[in-house]
Amino acid sequence: MVELKTPPELEKMRTASGIVASTLALLREKIKPGVSTLELDRLAEAEIRRRGAQPAFLGYRGYPATLCVSINEEVVHGIPNAARLIVEGDVVSLDLGAVWEGFYGDAAITVAAGRIKPERTRLLEVTEAALYRALETVKSGIRIGDVSHAVEEFVASTGMGVVREFTGHGIGRHLHEEPSIPNFGKPGTGVVLKPGMTLAIEPMVCLGAAEVVVKDDGWTAVSADGSCAAHFEHTVAVTEDGCEILSSIQD
Ligand code: MF3
Ligand code: CO
């Protein structure tokens, strides 16, 4: 069952997602050589709490932090660590969730640390563009498979690989709700979108092959071939003729 949110519920999701977006905007400015991923996590948690919300990932299925920081060949779910310092040329994915009055917001960005190789710049551009292709597809009456296919086709046209092991998801009273939103699929299949559905859409793209493996820490997913990866995510609400991005920066 895909739950439709009422206008007051959407307002709470707007607040939760806005707090995520503002916190990501703050973190983006801190992505510099020498900064540890744990410092980023501490900052994220303090900012979310300062704004009156709670971290969504902390304790979720045992996840030990507020933020996921995934560097270079790490695709998603990198665990913050005091010993892991950002270095010039890294691409750093920041994935963050917050809860406000019982409703969740979830978003991710990938940021360059200093000067990066041109192919990495292209990876960031392609992954963010893949997210926007998906968002442009979303409106009442289309199906999840249409969104999934838009991402798959766009990424394939660039020669990069879209990750299949992880998906986007419905979001609301829970971090993960139905439907699941793969980044590949067949047009005209799957759940029909309706106004009031709230979705977290999150393409993950590798410069090389798209296969991922999870490291011994049980969380960090890395590309199997060691190629660099990027991740962008927004929480959106489906409307009659499109979608409202709930996790765009509001202040
Ligand atoms: N954006 C990711 C997701 O929706 C973040 C989950 S990290 C976890 O799956 F720690 F909460 F699992
Ligand atoms: Co998500």
Image (cartoon, rainbow, N blue to C red):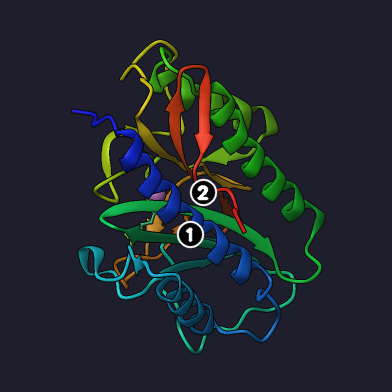
Q: How many numbered marks have been drawn onto this rendered protein structure?
A: 2
Q: CA distance from mark 1 to mark 2?
A: 7 Å
Q: Which residue is mark 2?
A: 247
Q: Secondary structure at mark 2?
A: loop
Is 45 in front, or is 83? 45
Amino acid residing under circle 1: Val
181 lies above or below 188: below
The x and y percentages for residue 107 are 48, 52
Query: Which quarter of the image is occupied by the N terminus?
Result: top left
1 lies above or below 75: above
Q: Quadrant of residue 113?
A: bottom right
Query: Which quarter of the image is occupied by the C terminus?
Result: bottom right
228 lies above or below 236: below
The x and y percentages for residue 91 are 65, 64
Q: Secondary structure at mark 1?
A: helix
The x and y percentages for residue 8 are 33, 41
Q: Dots 1 and 2: beta carbons under 8 Å?
A: yes
Q: Is mark 1 within 8 Å of ligand 1?
A: no
- Relative to 21, 4 lies left or right: left
